[in-house]
Image: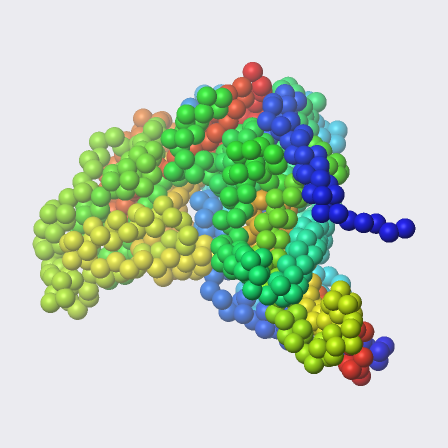
Amino acid sequence: MIGFVARRLLQAIPLLIGVSLIGFGLMHLAPGGPLAVYTLNPTIQAQDIERIRIIFGLDQPIHVQYVKWATGIFSGNWGYTFFGGRPVLDVILERLPATLLLMGSALSVAILLGLSIGVLGAVKRYSVFDVLATTGALFALSFPTFWFGLMAIFVFAIELRWLPSGGMWELGEEGNILSLLQHLVLPTLVLALVITATWSRYSRSAFLEVMHQDYMRTARAKGVPPRARLLRHAFPNAAKPLIALLGVEVPFLFSGALVTETIFGWPGMGRLFVDALGMKEYPVLMGMMMFTAIFVILGNLLADIAIAAIDPRVRLR
Amino acid sequence: MTIRISRRGVLAGSAGTAMLLAAPTVRGQSINRDRIILAMTQEPVQFNPLLYVNAGTENVPEACLFDALWDVDDKGNFIPNLAAQVPSRQNGGISADGLTWTVNLKRGVKWSDGQPFTAKDVEFTYQTIMSPNVAVRSRSGFDLIKAFRVKDDHTVEMELSRPFVPFLWAWQNMHIVPHHILSREQNIQTAAFNSQPIGTGPFLLRSRTAGSHMVYERNPNYHRGPAKVRQFIHKFVPDQMAAYGQARTGEVDYLALGGVPNDRWAEARAFPDRDFLLYPTPNVQFIYYNCGKPQFADPRVRRALTMATQMQKSIDDIYFGTWPRTLSYLQPTHWAYNGDLRDYTNDAAGAERLLDEAGWRRGADGIRAKDGVQLKFTMSTTAGNVARQGCQALFQQNWKAIGVEMEIRNMPASVVWGEYTTQSRFDTLLVAWDPTVGLDPDYTARCHSRMIPVKHRQGSNYVQYENAEVDRLLELGVTQTEQADRIRTYRQIQAILHEEVPFAAQGGSVQGHLKRKQLQGPTPNQYVTDITWNVYDWAWA
């Protein structure tokens, strides 16, 4: 087990280097660049842009810029932002709590709901509930998130005035848990809606597949009661693909939700990414990419370990 | 112990939680007279007034925390700020030859850490602007300073290499930074000061929640007297529609910059407890013709293309008639605007005659051509700007009617305004720009023949326009000290540009702001990009 984890972590190093190389290369090959922001400022002339290009080090060949950045990362220096001159790691870490909270609550609500709906749908296949649930899931998946978001704001914040329309706290009440919860409700629900839909569909098909296996019929023939059949026999088998799905979704906890965060003014990583992308803030984009890549690797590793734990046939070597 | 979860229990619990969460939000709607909440869609990231680049949103920390030597009011007059008076020939601040500028500084001004503000700070600000290691956005005007002398603690003297009347605007645009803090920094670019600034301004930065808002507290020792509210909050709501929603519910007191979406203006005007402010900006929107491309080398072609466009219709239909039509690079209300210019657009027949005369004849495919060059080109702007896309579609139709083919090729901002623009690779652009030296009518950077970046590596004459008479007039204009003389010169420049059209002006952009009726202070000022230009004066009625 320890050997397995150590080996996987070692394998991650060349993977991360590859990710950073491709990311850095693509970012610089894509047309446009951070200096465009300067062009729009009317006082700025060609000579100013040239001077700033040199100060930012953007006049150097790409491989020199990459080596500089990579050496920095190895010594723990993630670089400084172009436009604020702040350490990239600070900029990322100050957004992390908001994103963790929103994604954490949305994922928990969604998995709980999605799993229940999916299992129930599989058990009572083709029932009214099942038809409603699958149609509803299709509906939720087909409509764009921004539409749900704007509708939620319109109905609950502007018309009914039950909940605040955006932000994370009532201004001046930072630290007030009640205020935080109020602000959390709408973005969580909107985000959870789509994830619930995905999870209900996945879990429904995972359970359906398992429930027609021979061992399920054997269990029934032995006289195992329905609840025990579901929990002890079906669940561990059906959970495997779901754990793999969870492993893939865990990194989203850190990368944030672009659309939902923008509509609800939620100060998380998704918005940081959108802003950085718009301005081609290379150091922040690279930082966020590495951050996400690390969590993708960790998420998959954890999923593998979890699958091995519930399925004795899987051995970690 | 076992916990039995009943369906009824779950429902009751959920309903209770929902009511608990919903109950106290009504609080957000009433006015808190202790503070003012201003909302914008963008967030400032750089609080050092010399280093920011995103005018508009980054003007807010600048105005709250720092001071310039002088400001500009909504009539276009310079008013002293850190300077005791605005230098002029009459008060001896500017020498007779226009080369020596003496500035007397206000006494008794303190930085918010208690240190005195002195001439050393002004000198240090100038030195930073000229430092090769600091990414200061622009040196326009400052590069003319030949010698900078600190005469005493409250007097500085600057000697210019040539007379330059817009020099006042250069200092209006750059706020003063503290010598005693920044001179100790190894690298100003990454100094902690840039996110925890110390200034002389009306407010102090109390806290910043990344991605959400910044809280300012009144500076009790402000040299123009303490601000009238204790707290000022700058809130960021990235989605314009959502921001408008917050201005309606009262979660924000004032929605500015971007403001109310154009299609909601009629609705916003009707709210009984809100003021809808028409806020003219210094921004004028243009069609830029790249004179370096063979299609646009002949001024008659540029003129004919402009004649064919329905400019007024584009304003009426797309901007709901809210933008003033302008025929020059200045807003029609600017003191130097040439009111004699005649609008020759919306004349397709005239455009066809002029193209025929210039030798551009329709080919078999209906597209005009001359010497093997077809009158076919692209037009670019920031992708996703719905209003501009509407204008492009209208112009495309207008041109198609006279045998000209235009293809819309929009790109993300970071692409279209990069080298595509600065290295003059475009055919035409749809772009909005302010004048280049504050709101002075000087336009040297945009249309002097020496200012073409692809040829001379300087300036911002991206349309590659060359005209010896315009060059001469531009050089004359910046040396004239009498306003009447300047008006004559700049009217002449505008008249030539109106004939030769290197860029065709469409309209002056106007924003729709929404504020609570009781909020006093926010005043439209077309001479600055900063909507908080008088924030020290904002108050509740």
Residue B351, above or below B74: below
Quadrant housing residue A208: bottom right
Residue at the (69%, 49%) spot, across then down: A98
Q: x, y (%) of residue A65?
A: 61, 68
Q: Considering only vertical position in the picture, is A298 above or below A179?
A: below
- Measuring 58% from the left and 49% from the top, which residue is drawn there? A190
Q: Is residue A157 left or right of residue A168?
A: left
Against A99, is A123 above or below?
below
Residue B202, image x, y percentages = 64, 27
Whether residue B511 appears in this view of the structure is no
At which x and y percent is residue B344?
18, 40
Q: Quadrant of residue B295?
A: bottom left
Residue found farthest to the top:
B541
Nearer the observer, B189 or B16? B16
Question: What residue do we see at 64% from left, 59% from top?
Answer: A117
Question: Measured from the top left, where is residue B423 in percent x and y?
Answer: 40, 60
Q: Residue at x 34, y 29 (%)?
A: B333
Among the 4 quarters of the image, the one containing residue A182 = top right
Where is B18 relative to B107, above or below?
A: below
Residue placed furthest toward the right: B1
Tell me the quadrant of the picture where the C terminus of chain B can be found: top right
> Is residue B517 in sight in this rendering?
yes
In the image, B496 versus A114, the foreground residue is A114
